Amino acid sequence: MTMCRKNVFMTLVLVFALIAVGAYAGGQGEGADQPKVIRVSHTLAPDSHYNQGLMYMKELVEERSNGSVRMELFHSAQLGSERDVVEGVSLGTIEATLTSTGPLPNFTNAFMVFDLPFIVQDLDKAYAWMDGPEGERILRSLEPAGIKGLGIWENGFRNLTNSRRFVQEPSDMQGLRIRLMENVIHVATFETLGARAVPMAFGELFTALQQRTVDGQENPLVIIDTSSFYEVQDYLSLTGHFYSPAVLLINLDFWNNTLSAEEREIVAQAEREARTWQRNFSREGQAELRRKLEAEGMEVAEVDPQLWFEAVQPVYDQFADEVGRDAIESFVTAQQ
Ligand code: EAX
C-alpha cells in the first residue's frame, strides 16, 4: 500500500473502532441516571504527568457532579496516535484528548508559536500568557474544526537523547537520525542542525530506538523516564530546545449539547485546578529525574543554550509569516 492509502486505511480502522466503543459508551449514557462519559485519550504511560493530571481532574469532576459526569482515561496510545485521536475529537468519535502541539498545525496555525525553538525563556510569564486572552484566542482557533480547547497544560522542555555519541554542541548533531513529532517546525529545526529528521508517531518510538531505525529522539525528562527510553539510549543532552505544552481538547458538540451548563462549569473549574496541579507536578523533581536517569546509566551533557539558539535562528525567518509575526512578538514580549 502507498503511504497515503495506508493512512486512509488506518484512519478508517480507527474510526470504526471508536464508533464501536462509542456505541457502547453511548448506550451506557442513555437514561436519566446514567452518567455522561468523557473518554480521554493520550499517548503516555500510566505514571506520566499527563495521566496523573487527568486522574486529579477526574476525581474533582466525578465528586462535584455527584457522578453525573464520568471521565474514562485511556493511556499509552490505546485509542491511537495523537494525530488520529485529535481527528477523532474533531469528528466526535471520542470526546477528549490531552495532546502535544505536534499534530495541531493540521487544523490551525495558531499553536505553531509554541513549536519554535527556545521561544519559552520565562516559564511563569509564559503560563500567564497561555492562560490569558492570547491563549484563549489560540484555543478558540480550533472551534471551526469542532473542537473546544479547554486549557493548556504541560508536557515540558524537550531534551535530546541518542545512542551514538555524546552531544554537546550543535555541530555534534551532524548526520544523527532523530525521531521527531510529525510537526513541520520541529522537523525544520533538526534539519537546520544537520540531523536527519524522522517524523514518527510516539507509539512506534520505543521499538524504533531499540531496533536502531533511529539514533535518537527528544522529549521531556519525565517521558524519557516513564517510557523507559534510558534502556535504549546512552546519551542525554540537556538542550531544552522546545517547550512543549499539552493541550486538553474536547469535542465541541459534546461540550455544548451533551453537558448541561452546570456540568460545563464543573468541568471548566476542575480543568483550571488540574492545570495548575499538573504544571507543578511536571516542574517538580527535574533534578531528581536527572539523577535517576544518570543512575540508569545515561551520560548527561549540559549545553550552552545560547549556542544552540543561534544555530536554529534560520527557523524563525523560515516560519515567521506562517506562525504570525504578531503572535511571536506578543509571546516574546510577555516574557521580558
Ligand atoms: O504528547 O510525541 C511526543 O514525543 C510527545 O511528547 C508525546 O506524545 C506526548
Image (cartoon, helix red, strand yellow):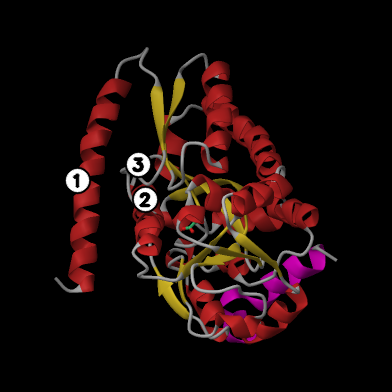
Q: Position of residue 112 (x, y in %)?
A: 57, 68
Residue 41 at x, y percent in the picture = 41, 42
Residue at image coords 38%, 47%: 89
Q: Is residue 56 above or below residue 132?
A: above
Discs 3, 2 touching: Cβ within 8 Å? yes
Q: Under tag 1, what secondary structure?
A: helix
Q: Is residue 334 left or right of residue 202?
A: right
- For the magenta stretch, what is the residue range? 315-334
Disc 3 residue type (three-letter): Ile
Foreground of the two, 26 or 220: 220
- Tell me the SS state at disc 3: loop
Q: Quadrant of the N terminus?
A: bottom left
Tell me if mark 1 has few (under 14), some (14-19) or many (20+) residues whose alpha carbon lies within 10 angstroms of its own: few
| Ligand 1 closer than 8 Å to label 2 CB | no
Disc 3 to disc 2, how far (Cα)?
Answer: 7 Å
**Residue wearing tag 1:** 16
Based on the displayed image, in which of its 4 quarters is residue 114 positioned?
A: bottom right
How packed is label 2: few (under 14 Cα within 10 Å), some, or many (20 or more)?
Answer: many
| Residue carrying label 3 | 94
- Give the mark toward the camera: 3 or 2: 2
Report the residue marked by disc 2.
85
Query: Which amino acid, by three-letter code, is at mark 1?
Result: Phe
